């Protein structure tokens, strides 16, 4: 069964606008600065272009997030930025957000909490969210970098149904 992350919303539209503004600023700034200092103009254009590229990559990834659940576990993806496989036996609890999570709704994209019990947040906006607590670190990749996570939070269109489905899968395995 596949659950989709929200693909639209104010946050995603804001990312598109910000990405295009950065790209426009890169062109305008490069032309203005290049007249006085060509090296600074090229550097400004490169930095602003890379920034807008990352923002537009995040915009694209936010439209492609999904969670696939089968008898073995969950594959959580926000392609091409992040991917994690969570075996069912490692899930301690699946719940809907009951408390505000720092940055949830304020930050968009993929966030990683490093340290004891690292977390992986795949946040699309203010919509409903689900949280998985894990018994041991599971492997994930963010921008191709491997890491271990013990908590996964994600925005989902059908968060309540997802939590119920995962809890029923965990009951069947016991």
Image (tube, rainbow, N blue to C red):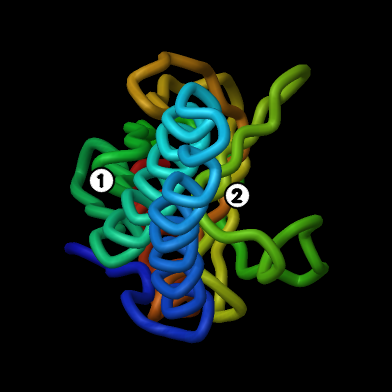
1 or 2: tag closer to the N-terminus: 1
Residue shown at 50% from the left, 67% from the top: 18
User: Which type of secondary structure does the marked residue at label 1 adopt?
Assistant: loop
Q: Which residue lies furthest to the front in this view?
A: 36
Q: Name the residue under label 1.
A: 79
Q: Mark 2 points at which residue?
A: 93
Q: Where is residue 147 in the image (x, y as percent from the top left)?
A: 50, 16
Q: Residues within 10 Å of mark 1 (few under 14, many from 20)?
A: some
Q: Where is residue 23 in the image (x, y as percent from the top left)?
A: 39, 57
User: Which type of secondary structure does the marked residue at label 2 adopt?
Assistant: strand
Can residue 168 be seen here? The reply is: no
Quarter placement of the C terminus: top left
Do the residues bearing badges 1 and 2 touch, measured as CB atoms within 8 Å? no
Residue shown at 39% from the left, 43% from the top: 49
Residue shown at 43% from the left, 71% from the top: 156
* Viewer-nearest of discs 1 and 2: 1
Q: Is residue 60 above or below residue 163?
A: above
Nearer to the camera, 105 or 44: 44
Q: Position of residue 52 (x, y in %)?
A: 42, 50
Q: Is residue 106 above or below residue 65?
A: below
66 relative position to 133: left or right: left
Can residue 151 be seen here? The reply is: yes
Q: Residue 4 carries which label?
A: none
Query: Residue 165, located in which quarter of the rendered image?
Result: bottom left
Nearer to the camera, 139 or 56: 56
Residue shown at 30% from the left, 54% from the top: 61
Q: Where is residue 135 in the image (x, y as percent from the top left)?
A: 60, 27
């Amino acid at each position: 069964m596949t659950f989709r992350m929200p693909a639209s919303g104010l946050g995603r539209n804001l990312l598109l606008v910000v990405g295009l503004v950065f790209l426009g600023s890169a062109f305008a700034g490069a032309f203005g600065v290049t007249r006085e200092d060509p090296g600074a103009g090229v550097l400004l254009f490169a930095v602003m272009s890379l920034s807008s590229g990352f923002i537009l990559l995040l915009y694209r990834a936010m439209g492609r997030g999904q969670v696939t659940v089968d008898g073995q576990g969950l594959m959580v993806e926000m392609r091409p930025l992040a991917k994690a496989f969570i075996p069912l036996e490692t899930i301690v609890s699946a719940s809907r957000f009951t408390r505000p999570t720092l940055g949830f709704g304020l930050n968009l994209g993929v966030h990683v909490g490093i340290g004891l019990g690292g977390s992986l947040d795949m946040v699309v906006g203010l919509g409903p969210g689900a949280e998985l607590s894990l018994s041991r670190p599971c492997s994930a990749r963010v921008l191709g970098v491997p890491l271990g996570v013990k908590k996964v939070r994600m925005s989902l269109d059908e968060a309540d149904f997802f939590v119920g489905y995962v809890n029923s899968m965990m009951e069947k395995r016991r």
